[in-house]
Image (tube, rainbow, N blue to C red):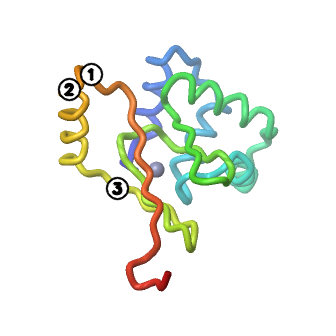
Amino acid sequence: MDDLSIAELENRCQQGGLRVTANLSEILQALITGPDHPDVESLHERLRARGKRVSLATVYRNLGHLVAAGVVAEQHFGPGKTRYEVATPHDHLIDISTGKIIEFSEPRLNALEEKIAAQMGYRIVRRRLELYAVPLDEKS
Ligand SMILES: [Zn+2]
């Protein structure tokens, strides 16, 4: 969602204990260019379209490392495939009639969540909000 540079992402990887290999860097590049939330196959196709000879297994393995390091987030929107994106604080609205995924960020909502958790004696360490919706002008 935010425009993160490849240098910032590589920095995050190093902070997360990852060694930034050429493949890892290419995967990050492919992830931040092109449509959001690709699944592993479309990410692999994107890499190949860029002329990178990298196997699907390598993409899977590197994504696993990136997710474990907290640099990349795995998303499961409904029954579809696992999708990937750079981990940034934002929420999603999924248009269930078209499958379109819209990102949004609402600080007032986050503040309210923090307040609710605090009232229950908790501090939020991880959050996930997905809104499944149909357009207002759509029947049913
Ligand atoms: Zn997103």
Where is mark 2, residue-wise?
Answer: 118
- Tell me which residue sits at (74%, 50%) in the image: 41
The three-letter code of the residue at mark 1 reads: Tyr
Q: Position of residue 2 (x, y in %)?
A: 36, 48
Other-residue count near label 1 (Cα within 10 Å), few / some / many at <14 / 14–19 / ≥20: few
Q: What secondary structure is marked by label 2?
A: helix
User: Looking at the image, which is closer to me, 27 or 88?
Assistant: 88
Q: Position of residue 118 (x, y in %)?
A: 20, 26
- First reached walking from the N terminus: tag 1 or tag 3: 3
Q: CA distance from mark 2 to mark 3?
A: 24 Å
Where is mark 3, residue-wise?
Answer: 104
Q: What secondary structure is marked by label 1?
A: loop
Q: Position of residue 9 (x, y in %)?
A: 45, 33
Q: Which mark is residue 13?
A: none
* Residues at discs 1 and 2 in contact (Cβ within 8 Å): yes
The three-letter code of the residue at mark 3 reads: Phe
User: Looking at the image, which is closer to me, 81 or 85?
Assistant: 81
- First reached walking from the N terminus: tag 2 or tag 3: 3
* Residues at discs 2 and 3 in contact (Cβ within 8 Å): no
- In the image, residue 133 sits, relative to residue 107, either above or below, namely below
Q: CA distance from mark 1 to mark 3?
A: 25 Å
Where is mark 1, residue-wise?
Answer: 122
- In the image, residue 42 sits, relative to residue 134, either above or below, namely above
Q: Position of residue 128 (x, y in %)?
A: 42, 40
- In the image, residue 68 sits, relative to residue 37, either above or below, namely above
Tag in front: 2 or 3: 2
Task: Say whether residue 14 is left or right of residue 50.
Answer: left
- Tell me which residue sits at (81%, 38%) in the image: 55
